[in-house]
Image: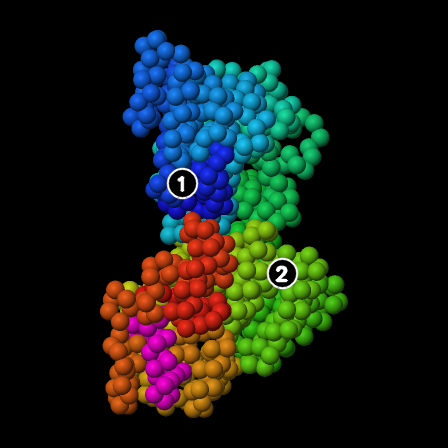
Amino acid sequence: MDLLEREVVFQTLLGHLEAAVSGPGRLVLLRGEAGIGRTAVVRQLEKLTDPHIRILVGACDPLTTPRPLGPLMDLAPYLGRPVRAALNGVAAGSCRTDEVFDHLLADLGTCPGLLVVEDVHWADESTLDLLRYLVRRLPKVPALVVVTYRDDEIGRTHHLNGLLGTLAGYPWVYRQDLAPLSRPAVARLATGYSVDAEQLHHLSAGNPFLVTAVLAAPGEPIPASVREAVAGRLAGLSAAARKAVDVLAVLGRPVPLKLLAGIVPDPEEPLDEAVACGIVCTDGERTEFRHELTRLAVLDAVPAAFRLGVHRQVLALVGSGPVVAEDLALLADHAEGAGDPDAVLRYAPAAASRAASSGAYREAAGQYARALLYADRLPPDRLAPLLEGHSQACLLSSRLDEGIAARRSAVRVRLMLGDQLREGDDLRWLSGWLWPAGRAAEARRTGQDAVRVLEGLGPSQELARAYLNLCRLACYGHEGEGATATYAEKANALGERFGDTGVLVQARFHTAAARMLCGEGGWEGCEQALSSALARDLPVDSGLLALLTCWLAALQRDVSRTGATVSRAESYCLDRDLQCYLLCARAWGSTGLLNRGAWTPAADAARAVLSHPHAPPLARSTALTVLGLVQARQGKARGSPLLEQAAELVDPDCLLDTGLGREARVEAAWLAGDHQLVRAEAGCALAALADRTHPWLSGPLACWIRRAGGTAPPVAAAGPYALELAGDWAGAAERWDGLDCPYDAALARLAGDAPALHQALTAFEALGAQPAAAHTRAVMRARGVRPGLRGPRSATRSNPYGLTNRELDVMKLLTEGLTDAEIAGRLYITPKTAGHHVGAVLAKLGVHTRHEAARKLHHCEP
C-alpha cells in the first residue's frame, strides 16, 4: 500500500543523511504512535539511500527481559571485527560495554553510513547508554543515526525519558514526527473498497495500521489483527487499569475525570497506567481512546453484565441533576445501553435535534433511529416529528432509502392526523429527495401533489417551499426558462411575505440556471445567488446550490469551471457533513476529469464514489457512466454493461435530465461502429426532449447523428455543437480547445481537412482512444489522406512522444499543476533532478511552458 503523505518526511531524512555523511554527523528522533508507520518509513528510506552509503538497521524487542545491546547483536555480522570481538567479550563477561562503544564509534568513522535503531521504547539500559555515548561524539563521524520510538507509550515514568532529556541539549539532534493520515489520504487508500471513507477516518483517526487492517478485512466490524494488537497492549495492565479501560470503552465519548471517578474509585493511578500503554490519552481533564476502532475492540470483549452496570451508573449519575445540552447524546447512548425506553425517548430526540442544528447529520440520524426503536410507545402526534427529523438527517447524510422511507411514513401519519399543512410539507420534502434518488417522474408527481394539498389551505411558508420545489424540478428537467420562472415568481411572492430568505435565494438561482441551460448566459446570476446563501449562513441551501453549480459547469463541458466548483462544493459539504451533496459533487467532478482527457483520474474518482456504501443513485449512475465511457473510449468491452447499470439505477427522465446518460450510450454505439444504433438511440433521445428547451442536451445528440452519417434534425444546440452542426468544424474545434476538452476537439476535426484529421489522430493516440483513432484512420483512407505512421504498438501506444518511464511519471504530475519541488516530493527525487526531467519532457513535446505541455498531452496511459 502507498506511503501517503510522507514525502516531506523522506525529503527531510534524506537531507539529514546528505548533511551527516558529509560531516558532522547528526541524530534524528523519528517518533509517532503505534501503527503510524515508522518501520515502513525506515524501509523506504533504505531504498532511497545512495547505494554507496552503508546501512545498518537494528531493533529492540518487546521482551520481558530485554537483551543487552540487542540492536548491536543483530548488526554484529555487518560490523568490523573489533566490534564483533568486543560484543563477544561482553557476552562472555570479559569485556566492558564502553569498549564496544569505542569500537562502534571507530567503525562508524570508516565510511559514510546510516545507523537505525528501531523501537527504543523497548530498549535495555545498555542500548540507551550506547545512544548517550554516540550522540555526544556524532560530530566526529560521517553518519546519520535514526532512532525510532512510540511516543504514545512514553508515560511520565518511562525509562526512555532519561535519554530524551539528555538528547535535548545537543544541537545536532533533530525530531521528526509522523502524523496520522488526512481525510483525503484515507479516501485515496479506500478507493475501490466498499467503505465509507469518512467513517473509516473517524474509526482510525488516520492511523495507517488501522486503515489497512479495515481495508484488508472487508465485512469484519473489527478486524482480527486489530483485536490481537489491542489484546497485546492490554495484556500487561493491572486489574485496576484494565477495569478503567473497560469503563472508558463503555462510556465511549471523551470522559471527564469526575464522571470516571464516580464509577472507578481513585482512578488516577489506573488511568496513568492505561495512558502509558498507549490505549487512551488525556489532557488532564478528559480522557478518551486514541482511536474509535480500538475502543470498539475493547468494548467487544467487555462482558454484557459489566456494560449494563456501567450504563445504569452513568444514567443515574448524569441524569440525577440538571441536564445540560452537552450531556444529551451521552444520556441517550446510556439510556439505550441501560435498557430504559422512557429515558431513550426523553433524551434521544433532544440529542438528535441538537446534532442536526449543529450540522452533525449522521449523528442526528443515529439518535432519531434510536428513538424510533420505541415508536410503538408514541402517539401519532409525537411520532410524526421524529419521522420527519429522521428523514431529513438521513437524506443529508446520504442514506436516501432510509430517509425516503421515513418521509413516506410521516406522510401517512400526518394524513391520519388530518394535518394537511404538515402532510403537504412532507410531500414537498419527499419530492425534493426523489430526484437525487433517480426517480424524476415520481418527484414531479409528488411535488404537484404537495402543491395541490397546500394551495387548498391558503398562503403559507410551506406553499412557498412547494412552489420552489416545482421551480427546481422544472430547471432540472430542462422545461425552459418560462416554466421555471412561473414557479419562481409564485415562490418569491410567498417567500417575501413570510420572510423566507432561502426561498428567495434559491428561486433566483434556479431562474438564472434555467436561463443558462437555454444557452443564454446566467452564470453570474447563479454565483450571486450562491454568494447570498453563503453570506446568510444557509448551510443546506448553500450546499445544494454549490452542488448544482458543479452539474451546470459539467453539463456545459466547462472543464476549468467544473474543477473550481467541485473543489468549492467538496470543501463546503465536508465541513458541514452534507454527505449526499458531497458525493454528487464528486461524481460531477469525475465528468470534468473525463472531459479534460484525464481518464485514469476520472475513473479513479468515479470508483471512489461507487465504493461509498451510501452514494445516492444519481451519483452512482453518473460515476458508472464516466467509468463506462472511459472503458469504451479505451476500447475495453466492459464499457457497455456499465452504461446499462447506470441506466438501471435511475428512471428514464432522470437519465435524460442529467445530460450524460443518454449521450454516453449513443457514443458507445458509435465507438463500436454501429452507426445505425447511433442514429436510432439519438433519435429516441431527441424525441423525448421534444417538449423541452435543451440546447446542451439536444446539440450533442444531433452531432452524433451527423457523425454516424445521418442527417441531423434541426434542433436547438449550444456552443461548439451549434458550430459543428452548421458545418464550421474548425470553429467548433477551436471552441473545444478553449474549453480544454481535447477529445471533443478531436471529434469535431473528423469533419475537417487532411491537417485536421492528422491533428485528431494525434490527439486520440495521445489519449489512448483506440477506437476513435481506428475510426480516424478509416476516414483518412476513405478520403485518400495518408495517415503517415501506423498507430503505435501496444507497448508505446500511450507514449507517442518517446518519453521515458520517469518522464511519464513527471508528465502525469505536470498535468496536476505541481511545481518542481512538489514533483520531487512525490517521486522522492531532488527538486533539481525534477527540473531536469521537466525540461526533457517539454523538449520532447515541442512546447515551452507547463500549461502547453498539459494541453498537448493530458494523459499518457491507454
Q: Secondary structure at mark 1?
A: helix
- Image coordinates for residue 177, horizontal then vertical, percent: 52, 36
Q: On screen, 615 above or below 465? A: above
Q: Quadrant of the N terminus?
A: top left
Towards the viewer: 42 or 385: 42
Residue 155 screen position, x and y as percent: 54, 22
Is residue 221 in view from this perspective?
A: no
- Residue 109 visible (yes or no): yes
Q: Residue visible at 27% across and 86% down?
A: 786
Residue 839 locus on image (x, y percent): 44, 64
User: Where 151 falls versus 373 (above or below)?
Assistant: above
Residue displayed at 31% across by 28% down: 78
Q: Residues within 10 Å of mark 2 (few under 14, many from 20)?
A: many
Q: Amino acid at mark 2?
A: Ser
Q: Residue 542, labelled with which disc?
A: 2
Task: Please say whether residue 769 is one of the residues in the magenta stretch.
Answer: yes
Q: What residue range appears in magenta?
A: 747-772
